[in-house]
Every structure is written in structure tokens, then in C-alpha cells.
Image (cartoon, rainbow, N blue to C red):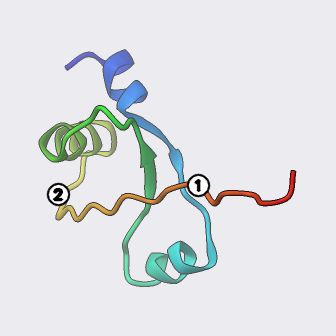
Amino acid sequence: MNKEKLLTLIQSPYITEKSSAAGELNQVVFKVALSANKLEIKKAIEQLFDVKVELSLIHISEPTRLGM
């Protein structure tokens, strides 16, 4: 994969209180493209950061706002 494609799969780090706590366990949380599958995400992170990856995925939906 070329670097441009890798960077479109991995959009940004996901910073929350829970992800910060995971950082203490040497875990990092990223926002990724919805079209990316588990294998593509794993390869992208391994190539970009030169690390061995154990991957688990969760889908987080944006909160809905009421009354607007």
C-alpha cells in the first residue's frame, strides 16, 4: 500500500478519558475510515508505525443532539 492510502485509512487518534487510560497499557485508539476492514487497518498501522499490532475493533456512533 502506498503512504497516501494508509493515511486515508487511519484518520486521527481518538482522544477520550478512556483512550487515555488505555495508553497506560500501551494501547492506542484511532479513528479510521468506515470502509476499512480489520486486515487493512492492521497492515496500515504496522507499516506507518513499524510495530506489531493486536487489533480489536469497536464502532462508535456520534451522539445525537435533541432539541435543535
Q: Quadrant of residue 16?
A: bottom right
- Vertical placement of 64 versus 19: above or below? above
How far apart are the two marked residues, 2 and 1, measured between alpha carbons?
30 Å
Q: Nearer the viewer, mark 2 or mark 1?
A: 1
Badge 1 amino acid: Glu
Badge 2 amino acid: Lys
Q: In this view of the protein, which residue sits in the foreground, 62 or 43?
A: 62
Q: Position of residue 54 (x, y in %)?
A: 17, 64
Q: Position of residue 40 (x, y in %)?
A: 18, 36
- Residue that carries the numbered disc 2 in the rendered image: 52
Q: Quadrant of residue 25?
A: bottom left
Q: Is the residue under label 1 in contact with that under label 2 (CB below 8 Å)?
A: no
- Vertical placement of 65 versus 39: above or below? below
- Residue that carries the numbered disc 1 in the rendered image: 62
- Residue sitting at x 17%, y 47%: 38
- Residue sitting at x 32%, y 37%: 48
How many residues crowd around disc 2 within 10 Å: few (fewer than 14), some, or many (20 or more)?
few
- Vertical placement of 40 versus 54: above or below? above
Q: Position of residue 8 (x, y in %)?
A: 41, 25
- Residue sitting at x 53%, y 52%: 13
Q: Is residue 65 left or right of residue 47?
A: right
- Vertical placement of 23 versus 36: above or below? below
Q: In this view of the protein, which residue sits in the foreground, 66 or 23?
A: 66
Q: Position of residue 33 (x, y in %)?
A: 39, 35
Q: Quadrant of residue 43?
A: top left
- Residue sitting at x 41%, y 28%: 7
Q: Quadrant of the N terminus?
A: top left
**Nearer the N terminus, badge 2 or badge 1?**
2
Q: In this view of the protein, which residue sits in the foreground, 45 or 36?
A: 36
Q: Residue furthest left?
A: 39
